[in-house]
Image (cartoon, rainbow, N blue to C red):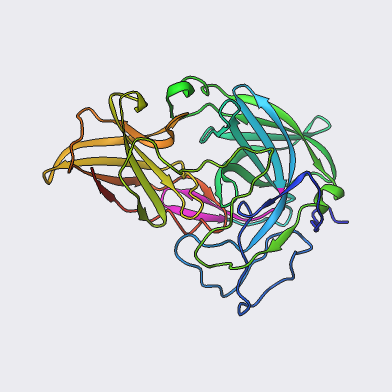
Amino acid sequence: MNRRTFLTASAAVFGSLAGCAGGKSPPESTPRQTPSPRPTGTPPYYEGVDLPHGVYVQPFENAMSMQGRAEAGPYRVALMYAAPHRFWLVEGDRASERPIRPADDLHLMAAVWDPETGVVVPETGLSVEISRDGETVSEEVIYPMLSQSMGFHYGGNFILDGDGTYEVEVTVGGLPIRATGAFEGRFESPQSATLPLSFTEAEREAVAVERLEEYGERGAASPSRMDALPSPLTVEDVPGEGLGTASTHDAEVVPTILDGDAAPVGDQYLAAYLRTPYNRMAIPGAAWSATVRRGGEMFTELDLRRTFDPEVGYHYGAELSTALRAGDEIVLTPVTPPQVARHEGYERAFMEVEPVSFVV
């Protein structure tokens, strides 16, 4: 059996990834290029599908192989892989495709979370060194990513050196954004953990790619749940005084005002959340500013800092030096779109974001 062949099977160690490689298939009227699941395990591509300029249901799902979990200082890390598939990197205001290379063996993924709260830790940065028999096979940074099944995680396609067992040293960087509350000072220094990776025929036979329904329609594949992984980083009910929800290029913006002890910083605080539609996954890595207008005139301007708090969650926020009044208008303005890689279904969204406004 070819070392890059992925076939269907089932085993307790494997879980479905409906969004990290997930979605649903084209309608019957759309020409199908390959049978499902594909013997090579690589994702199918379709011609002539009119995709929306925003979030859409992805064309396939696949299983993933959970390789294990380990402690790395204050973090817990999980390592898993799926069949190789394409994704898009974001630099500035452009998204560029990273196609599958002919030699790619797998799509390696890692999740990082706080074991005390079970909350996914965003934006730490993560690198891996893959070795075998003491020799380095591959060493590189892997990308922060958004998928419809896992939400925020890290991933990339890798080339290995044949069947066998590898060691993967995962290095989690210090958190480069503001941490408040009980998270303050917890995630400041890089930490490492080493996990085994089994790349064998039996493992690969349990990693499958399978078409789903409704590929290309507006919507999203359902999030996956695995006992070995934390819940995805989502934005559901926000704390404080919510000001409503607005959408810009499919990014949902949800601001709230927190007072007193509920405020991560100061006596009154503006927190703005950015999330995907449908699955309400948190969207990290953007830059936003805020303007408060009172009586039609600009009252104050704020830079919203990316902030991680155990009570308030991941958000974009700033202290308000002067208390807001009823009728004040808050205008939230994007400075940089989310600098996070995307799997299929998200690569056409969250880029052309525009200002949104709310009234207190």
Q: Name the quarter where the N terminus is drawn.
A: bottom right
User: Which percent across, then down, holds residue 317?
Assistant: 35, 34
Q: Is residue 66 above or below residue 311?
A: below
User: What range is drawn magenta here?
Assistant: 82-97
Q: Nearer the viewer, residue 65 or 44?
A: 65
Q: Main secondary structure of the magenta part?
A: strand
Residue at 85% x, 56% y is 2
Q: Which residue is farthest right?
A: 1
User: Which percent across, then down, holds residue 66?
Assistant: 73, 41
User: Which percent across, then down, holds residue 247?
Assistant: 36, 54
Q: Name the quarter where the C terminus is drawn.
A: top left
**Apparent side of residue 353 relative to residue 146 in the rendered image (left or right):** left
**Apparent side of residue 12 relative to residue 313 in the rendered image (left or right):** right
User: Which percent across, then down, holds residue 288?
Assistant: 34, 42
**Apparent side of residue 183 relative to residue 103 in the rendered image (left or right):** left
Task: Residue 298: say if magenta.
Answer: no
Residue at 75% x, 59% y is 41
